[in-house]
Amino acid sequence: MGAALRTLSGKLISAVHIEAYIGRATVCAEAIAIGNAISNGEKYFDTIVAVRHPYADEKNRELKVVSPCGMCRELISDYSPDCFVILEIDGELQKTKISELIPLKYSRES
């Protein structure tokens, strides 16, 4: 997996998924991209996308845009509630606001 994040200032930040033997230690590419952006002074995000790359033994070599997992959705929303996510819906790429992927999001103010 890989992810690309465009900040509101126009910078592009990319990252890769880090797989771990113990699943809980695995870190998604989106989380790493967000951490990298924040570490470099970028606080506001425009758009993020995650792409699945096939394993070496897979016959289908096609790259595929994938939806962020639930934890990444929360993270994106926490740091940039107006961020867009690129998704593949019915075979077409579409930009969707992160808030549409997390309806009724938890808030301390609620």
Image (cartoon, rainbow, N blue to C red):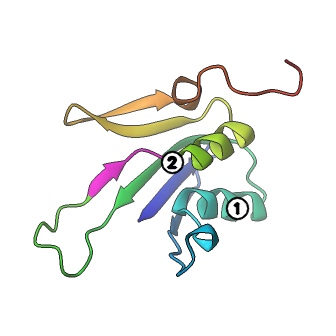
Residue drawn where x is 56% and y is 43% of the image: 70
Q: Quadrant of the C terminus?
A: top right
| Residue 68 magenta-highlighted | yes
Instruction: Report the disc number at residue 35.
Output: 1
Number of numbered discs: 2
- Does residue 30 lie above or below 109 as drawn? below
Looking at the image, the residue that sits furthest to the front is: 22
Few, some or many residues within 10 Å of mark 1 (<14, 14–19, 20+): some
Three-letter amino acid code of the residue under disc 2? Cys
Few, some or many residues within 10 Å of mark 2 (<14, 14–19, 20+): few
Residue 11 x, y percent position in the rendering: 59, 54
Instruction: Report the disc number at residue 69.
Output: 2
Looking at the image, the residue that sits furthest to the left is: 59
Q: Secondary structure at mark 1?
A: helix
Is disc 2 in contact with disc 1, using a CB cutoff of under 8 Å?
no
Task: Find residue 87 and report its image quarter.
Answer: top left
**Foreground of the two, 17 or 80:** 17
Residue drawn where x is 54% and y is 52% of the image: 5
Q: Earlier in the sequence, mark 2 or mark 1?
A: 1
Bounds of the magenta segment: 64-69
Between the residue at mark 2 and the residue at mark 1, the CA separation in whole angstroms equals 16 Å
Residue drawn where x is 88% and y is 27% of the image: 108
Instruction: Report the disc number at residue 1.
Output: none
Task: Answer left or right for 103 relative to 39.
Answer: left
Three-letter amino acid code of the residue under disc 1? Gly
| Residue 18 magenta-highlighted | no
Task: Answer left or right for 42 relative to 14.
Answer: right
